[in-house]
Image (tube, helix red, strand yellow):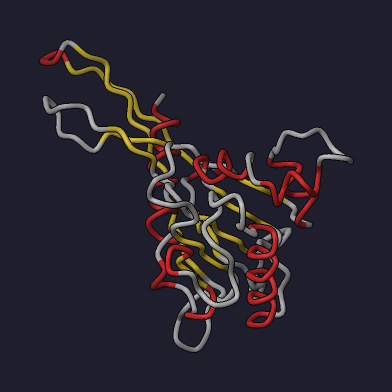
Amino acid sequence: MITSRVALGKEYRIYQKAAVASVYNTALTVDLSTAPTGFGPQWDVYATATPIKDIRTAMRLIHGQSFLQPNLAVISYKVMSALEDSQDLINRIQYVERAILTPDLVESLLGLSNCVVPGFGFASNNPGQTLTLSYLWNKEVILAYNPPRPGLKTPAFGYEFAWGFGGGLDRVVDRWREERRASDIVRLRTRYDLKLVGLDGSSKSICGFLFTNALTAGFVG
């Protein structure tokens, strides 16, 4: 349970670092609600939306800035559920694949190595208040270049830098008894930092692309 909580905390920090338009080169982020030039409408406007074209355009823009082909997509659960009804995607797969959009099918269709569909939710209310639940990843989509293995002078969208403990341990679990609380305490410790590393001269990311507001405000989900 504690390991799961630590992992969720890391995902929260990843979201805060990667799903913010201000960290990207201005050519590598679009808000689809503003009808940006070169992109179609939001992806739940099924009659005219062009998510495949939009994603391929974004991939070319990344390549034009970094000469790296993006191989990773992070598509929020809400956006993926909307894409399952996208005629643009259904038309591509209906005669050659099962007519159910899955992450591995997105990988094959777009030439990606990995497609991640985060569906992490959290309660934003204080204890004792009315329960307020929301998704962390909402209507965002990220495309990124992720190298097969990290290395010095190896470009990437971002790296997790970790430093362990003695004996080669990457985490430490401490346990002790607190009689005053009549409780056994379990504490897990890890050490890491998250950095965007593929940056331009203005310290803006050029190894990734961010779509915001990929769905309309009226999308139910």
Which quadrant does the N terminus fall into? top left
The percent coordinates of residue 109 (x first, y second) are 78, 52
Camera-side residue: 196 or 59? 59
Picture layout, residue 39 above or below residue 73: below
Picture layout, residue 16 above or below residue 210: above
**Numbered-mark total:** 0
Q: In this view, which residue lies farthest toward the bottom? A: 201
The percent coordinates of residue 194 (x first, y second) are 45, 59
Picture layout, residue 146 above or below residue 95: below
Which quadrant does the C terminus fall into? top left
The percent coordinates of residue 176 (x first, y second) are 28, 21
Camera-side residue: 34 or 147? 34
Q: In this view, which residue lies farthest toward the right? A: 96
Residue occupying image coordinates x 12% and y 28%: 129
The percent coordinates of residue 216 (x first, y second) are 43, 52
Camera-side residue: 190 or 34? 34
Camera-side residue: 66 or 147? 66
Residue occupying image coordinates x 85% and y 38%: 97
Q: In this view, which residue lies farthest toward the top? A: 182
Residue occupying image coordinates x 58% and y 65%: 40
Left or right relative to 11: residue 167: right
Q: In this view, which residue lies farthest toward the front? A: 47
Q: Quadrant of residue 147?
A: bottom right
